[in-house]
Amino acid sequence: MEIKTFDELFMRRCIELSQLSVDAGDAPFGSLIAIEDKLLVEGLNDYKTKVTEHAEIVALNKAHQALGSSDLSACTLYTSCEPCPMCSFMIREFKIKRVVFALHSPHMGGYSKWSILEDEKLGNIQPFFAKAPIVLPGYLEHEAKSVMDKTVFGQFFGK
């Protein structure tokens, strides 16, 4: 997968967002959505408020509002940790073109544990899902792990 010039900037911001989430007393996850080099929205984990408010879902819902559409096929989702199965299905339903994540999630990953993000058969279920997004896994993983390791979640994530 091709690394784009702005991937590092956006991933570093996701890692900052994960620290902001920790500072707010929540789990260490941050996500954002961009269209090429233009930041569209950011999402902090809000699990304490509502269990389904993972950073990716918060960002997806904000992008839906900002664009007035559930077709986010022009967008890239960046996230500090591999999306879980719930988030991965939402990514597929919102038709995200590209997913860039830092930490692998060997126990809950929608890419490495369950192949939801790369399941080509889901793309055949029209109009609900699009083809599988391009995935760049493990991008700036070490930097994201430094935030994760300061929390109780650290033992469950990364290689």
Image (cartoon, rainbow, N blue to C red):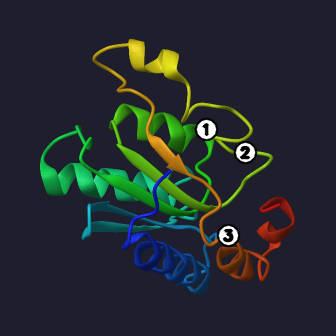
Estimate the spatial distance between the alpha carbons at disc 1 and disc 2, rounded to whole Å. Answer: 7 Å
Rendered view: 125 above or below 140: above
> Which of 156 and 96 lies nearest the eye of the viewer?
96
Classify 10 Å Cα crowding around label 3: few (below 14), some (14-19), many (20 and above): some
Estimate the spatial distance between the alpha carbons at disc 1 and disc 3, rounded to whole Å. Answer: 20 Å
Residue shown at the point (40%, 48%) measured from the top left: 98
Q: Are marks 1 and 2 in contact (CB under 8 Å)?
A: yes
Residue 37, how many percent across, how many down? 26, 69
The numbered dot on residue 139 is none
Outermost residue toward the right? 155
For the C terminus, give its image quadrant: bottom right
Q: Which of marks 1 and 2 is nearer the N terminus?
A: 1
Residue 110, how many percent across, how many down? 63, 40
For mark 3, give the secondary structure.
helix
Q: Which of marks 3 and 2 is in front?
A: 3
Kindly identify which residue carries mark 1. 85
Kindly identify which residue carries mark 2. 108
For mark 2, give the secondary structure.
loop
